[in-house]
Amino acid sequence: MRRFLVVLISGVAAVVLSSCLWAQDFKFERQQMKDRQKAEWKALRLKHKYAKESMKGQEVPKSIRIQTKHQLQREARELRQRHADERQDLKDRQRAIQEMPSGS
């Protein structure tokens, strides 16, 4: 009986410790993702700024200006969607790992 109790307690402790480690891993991964996404947004804003500045000093046809504007909007929309997908993937992985021990 004593041996069973020791095994049970050590098993519970192992599950608790592993779940704590997984949570820390996700916090680190979430912070890395947040920093990377912030840098990507900053780079995109700079790209937009330089594209607009490059057209200011020149005679650029209106059709080219509109095309450039739509391209910049498309890039921003794609980046926003990719970031949302990355965040959702992280949440899904975290949820799947949290459900694992309770499902066994």
Image (cartoon, grey):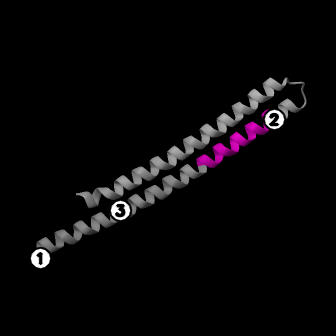
Instruction: Mark 3 or mark 2: name the one nearer the start of the chain.
Output: 3
Residue at horizontal 12%, vertical 71%?
A: 4
Percent coordinates x, y for residue 89 in the rendering: 45, 47
Percent coordinates x, y for residue 54 in the rendering: 84, 31
Nearer to us of marks 3 and 2 is 2
Amino acid at dot 2: Lys
Residue picked out by circle 3:
19
Instruction: Mark 2 or mark 1: name the one nearer the start of the chain.
Output: 1
Q: Going by the image, does 5 lie left or right of 64?
A: left
Q: Nearer the viewer, residue 12 or 102?
A: 102
Residue at horizontal 44%, vertical 56%?
A: 25
Q: Going by the image, does 33 lie left or right of 5?
A: right
Numbered circle sitting on residue 2:
1
Residue at horizontal 25%, vertical 57%?
A: 103
Percent coordinates x, y for residue 43 in the rendering: 69, 41
Please tell me whether the stretch drawn in magenta is mainly helix, strand or loop: helix
Placement of the C terminus among the 4 image quadrants = bottom left
The CA distance from mark 3 to mark 1 is 26 Å
Amino acid at dot 1: Arg
Region rendered in magenta? 36-51
Residue picked out by circle 2:
52
Percent coordinates x, y for residue 38 in the rendering: 64, 49
Q: Is residue 12 above or below residue 76?
A: below
Q: Secondary structure at mark 3?
A: helix
Can you tell which quarter of the image residue 68 is in?
A: top right
Q: Secondary structure at mark 2?
A: helix
Q: Going by the image, does 82 lie left or right of 99?
A: right
**Residue 23 lies in magenta, yes or no?**
no
The CA distance from mark 2 to mark 1 is 75 Å
